[in-house]
Image (cartoon, coloured by chain):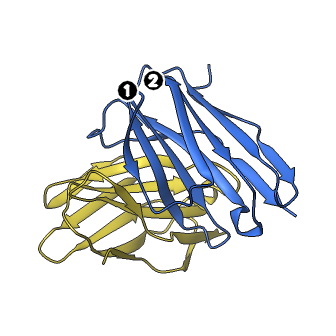
Chain colours: A yellow, B blue
Amino acid sequence: GQNIDQPTEMTATEGAIVQINCTYQTSGFNGLFWYQQHAGEAPTFLSYNVLDGLEEKGRFSSFLSRSKGYSYLLLKELQMKDSASYLCAVRTGGFKTIFGAGTRLFVKA
Amino acid sequence: DTAVSQTPKYLVTQMGNDKSIKCEQNLGHDTMYWYKQDSKKFLKIMFSYNNKELIINETVPNRFSPKSPDKAHLNLHINSLELGDSAVYFCASSPRTDDYEQYFGPGTRLTVT
């Protein structure tokens, strides 16, 4: 079956660094995505990994290990506006995108 | 200026009714999608169209029928609404089927009473 696991909730302090993990088991792999979704809003694209390694984009970085079926999203210099849900998603062999349930991140002052 | 738009934003209706949600994208993308996000926040693909042709059809009841009159529009019609259909429905688009970034509309919150 298809399965994407990520923690339900995390809490971190403003200015700190937080790492959100994601593990997946899917039939085929054509890339892993991270989306940010604020409450009551649409998901917005953050990052994409298809090869192993780290992709950096400003305060956000995403890592992928295909052999381990593992990814993480790293958020640096946390700001209050980073409080949101972070969705891990995998594009499968059939180019279907499967989303995890999301990790709700709470950033406290 | 809205890239992907949906109407209506909120929809409250009674069981057994038929309703439609409209989606339009002005990005010139070839591929459009419908997702359902339930109360547990799982975002699940329902349908995907590429250039007006259906390419993904998940295990969705026949009561749900997508229609794509042109590649800029993908509407969702739902017959005989049930309580379990209550959710937020997101439309999305991407330049091509194999493009990684999807652009999501603002969502339609459907409440069936």
Q: Badge 1: few (under 14), some or many (20 or more) residues near its Cα, within 10 Å?
A: some
Q: The C terminus of chain B appears in which quarter of the rendering?
A: bottom right
A50 or A62: which is nearer to us? A50
Percent coordinates x, y for residue A61 in the rendering: 32, 57
Instruction: Name the residue type under label 2.
Output: Lys
Compared across the picture, whether B59 is left or right of A54 comes to right
- Residue drawn 19% across the image and 54% down it: A50
- Residue drawn 33% across the image and 54% down it: A96
The chain ID associated with circle 1 is: B
What is the C-alpha distance between the residues marked 2 and 1?
A: 5 Å
Percent coordinates x, y for residue B49 in the rendering: 41, 37
Of pointers 2 and 1, the one earlier in the residue sequence: 1
Compared across the picture, whether B102 is left or right of B110 comes to left
In the image, residue A6 above or below residue A98: below
- Residue drawn 38% across the image and 62% down it: A98
Question: Circle 1 — which element?
Answer: loop
Contact? badges 2 and 1 (CB < 8 Å): yes
For residue B107, say whether it is visible: no
A14 or B6: which is nearer to us? B6
Compared across the picture, whether A67 is left or right of A64 comes to left
| Residue highlighted by disc 2 | B71
Q: Badge 2: few (under 14), some or many (20 or more) residues near its Cα, within 10 Å?
A: many
Task: Tell me the number on the disc at residue B15.
Answer: none
- Residue drawn 59% across the image and 39% down it: B105
Instruction: Name the residue type under label 1.
Output: Asn
| Residue highlighted by disc 1 | B51
Percent coordinates x, y for residue A33 in the rendering: 34, 55
In the image, residue B113 above or below residue A23: above
